[in-house]
Amino acid sequence: MYEFFHATVPGHVLLVVLETLAVLVPVLLLMAYATYFERKALGAFQLRKGPNRVGPFGLMQPFADAIKLLMKETIIPSGANRVLFLMAPAITFILACMAWAVIPTFDGGAIADINVGILYLFAISSLGVYGIVIAGWASNSK
């Protein structure tokens, strides 16, 4: 098994994909439930129940929110550059996920074990603003 993952190109690609999923899935779930607990706390502060409709105690609310986000109709302004307007959030999301490549998250180290990891992290995090700038520019907002 070791030979397949380290001596062949398809095995190495599969290993990188599996490592990436092993890092990103827990991070995305953690952020979804951090948002859930934040909404519960804000509901308590405002004397409301907070998210409690989906699943027991509202624990399935992050998944319902994700489905709602994916099913919603995208409203594109009439003067907007359609391609850039739709690509801008993807650029920001992909760059945020790429930053996790050099952060050590398991025993073997990080997905990309490079010597200039902190420089890579600074570079990728500084590129994240371009997605926001492109979204504003593509919307043709004055």
Image: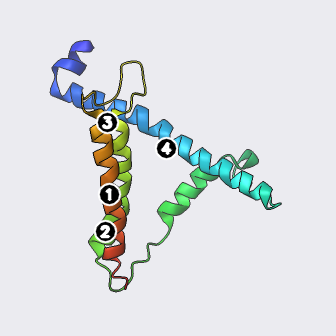
First reached walking from the N terminus: tag 4 or tag 1: 4
Image point 24% across, 28% down: which residue?
115
Secondary structure beneath disc 1?
helix
Residue linked to disc 2:
134
Amino acid on which the number 1 mark rests in the picture: Ile
> Could you say which is closer to the camera, residue 27 or residue 8?
27
Look at the image and name its color scheme.
rainbow
First reached walking from the N terminus: tag 3 or tag 1: 1
Question: Compared with residue 10, is residue 3 higher up or lower down, i.e. above or below?
Answer: above
First reached walking from the N terminus: tag 3 or tag 2: 3
Residue linked to disc 1:
91
**Is residue 101 visible to us here?**
yes
> Disc 4 vs disc 3: Cβ atoms closer than 8 Å?
no
First reached walking from the N terminus: tag 2 or tag 1: 1
Percent of width and height locating residue 61: 64, 52
> Disc 2 vs disc 1: Cβ atoms closer than 8 Å?
yes
Amino acid on which the number 4 mark rests in the picture: Leu
